[in-house]
């Protein structure tokens, strides 16, 4: 079977010279694998270079320093998070920053007080140039996320600006994450270093570099495929909220990360988890058939997704704090 990860050039859509080809190709991919790659996105390579460089510095920090970068609030997706298997072996580590630096920053940008719990403080490491490099890339990937939602709108036969009000940059719950390069030994074939899962938001934009194809997707027949590594491309996948918006017609796809067969193999990734404002109500679009999903706000859905994904994760460096935070989110969702 052909690898179900097509490459779509969105440059014609972005500059207005070809507003139809990219949406048609994206729509075809979204109704089958839910994964594709985009080129022609317009983000300079230098922005990626800067973030990969500070990510390497982050990975080289002493363990004690990394543990100090855990979110003080216990938010599972702020600051540093390390995942271990049951033998205590580190299998993955990542750093996450939100669109807003904390609750007050979110309030200052118009986020309603009832949604402030999600916007826990970012935890910035003391690495020269880290924060400006990450924030510069995040600004561009969030803007690219909005452009992708416009492509989604056209693909769904909606006005190009249909989703604009829901994904305004000043209220988005989007986050950016750094997975630094690391060597993961192969202990079985394949060695899964990040368990299979769905992403919970609207879409994920992932830039990757490395010596091997570690990201794998599972197609609708249950077969695993590796996603090629291209420095000029973003890997895009549909999240569960987009599946709900399309009434199941655009399926979220399970994916995982495996270790390299080569002991010296390594890969690093920079995902942006793009989402809408917390008060957005996601309900099946009228054009997508008899509704199969109940309406849900982005805030309520994110609370559920964080709790669910936390429960499925391996042991972490911040377990007790995470448990308390997730319990608060569960209470907020009642």
Image: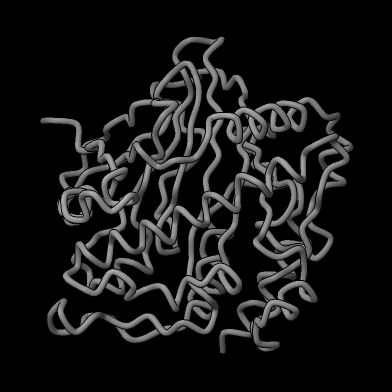
| Above/below status of 151 relative to 262 | below
* Left or right of 79 in this view: 249: left
Q: Residue at 31% of width from left, 43% of height from top?
A: 11
Q: Quadrant of the C terminus?
A: bottom right
* Left or right of 184 in this view: 36: left
Residue 252 image-quadrant placement? bottom left
Q: Residue at 57% of width from left, 22% of height from top?
A: 184
Residue in front for this viewpoint, 178 or 67: 178
Where is residue 44? Give x, y as percent. Answer: 52, 34
| Above/below status of 27 relative to 325 | above
* Left or right of 199 in this view: 264: right
| Above/below status of 242 relative to 301 | above
Residue in front for this viewpoint, 127 or 312: 127
Where is residue 127? Give x, y as percent. Answer: 84, 36
Q: Residue at 32% of width from left, 86% of height from top?
A: 294
Q: Residue at 41% of width from left, 45% of height from top?
A: 196
Where is residue 205? Give x, y as percent. Answer: 44, 47
* Left or right of 282 in this view: 290: left
């Amino acid at each position: 079977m052909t690898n179900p990860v097509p490459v779509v050039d969105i440059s014609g859509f972005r500059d207005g010279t070809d507003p139809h080809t990219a949406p048609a190709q994206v729509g075809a991919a979204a109704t089958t694998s839910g994964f594709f790659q985009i080129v022609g996105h317009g983000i300079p390579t230098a922005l990626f270079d800067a973030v990969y460089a500070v990510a390497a510095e982050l990975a080289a920090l002493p363990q004690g320093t990394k543990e100090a970068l855990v979110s003080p609030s216990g938010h599972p997706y702020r600051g540093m998070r390390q995942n271990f298997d049951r033998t205590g072996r580190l299998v993955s580590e990542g750093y996450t920053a939100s669109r807003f630096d904390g609750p007050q920053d979110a309030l200052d940008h118009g986020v309603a007080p009832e949604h402030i719990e999600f916007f826990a403080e970012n935890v910035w490491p003391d690495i020269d140039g880290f924060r400006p490099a990450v924030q510069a890339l995040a600004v561009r990937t969030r803007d690219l996320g909005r452009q992708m939602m416009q492509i989604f709108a056209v693909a769904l036969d909606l006005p190009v600006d249909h989703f604009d009000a829901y994904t305004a940059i000043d209220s988005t719950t989007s986050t950016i994450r750094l997975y630094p390069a690391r060597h993961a030994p192969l202990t079985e074939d394949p060695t899964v270093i990040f368990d299979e899962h769905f992403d919970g938001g609207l879409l994920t934009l992932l830039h990757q570099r490395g010596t091997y194809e570690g990201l794998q997707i599972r197609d609708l027949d249950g077969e695993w495929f590796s996603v090629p590594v291209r420095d000029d491309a973003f890997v895009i996948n549909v999240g569960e909220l987009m599946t709900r918006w399309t009434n199941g017609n655009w399926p979220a796809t399970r994916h995982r990360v495996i270790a390299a067969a080569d002991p010296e193999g390594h890969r690093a990734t920079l995902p942006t988890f793009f989402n809408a404002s917390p008060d957005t109500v996601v309900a099946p679009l009228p054009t997508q058939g008899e509704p199969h999903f109940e309406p849900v706000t982005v805030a309520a859905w994110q609370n559920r997704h964080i709790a669910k994904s936390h429960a499925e994760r391996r042991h972490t460096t911040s377990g007790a704090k995470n448990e308390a935070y997730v319990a608060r989110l569960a209470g907020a969702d009642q």
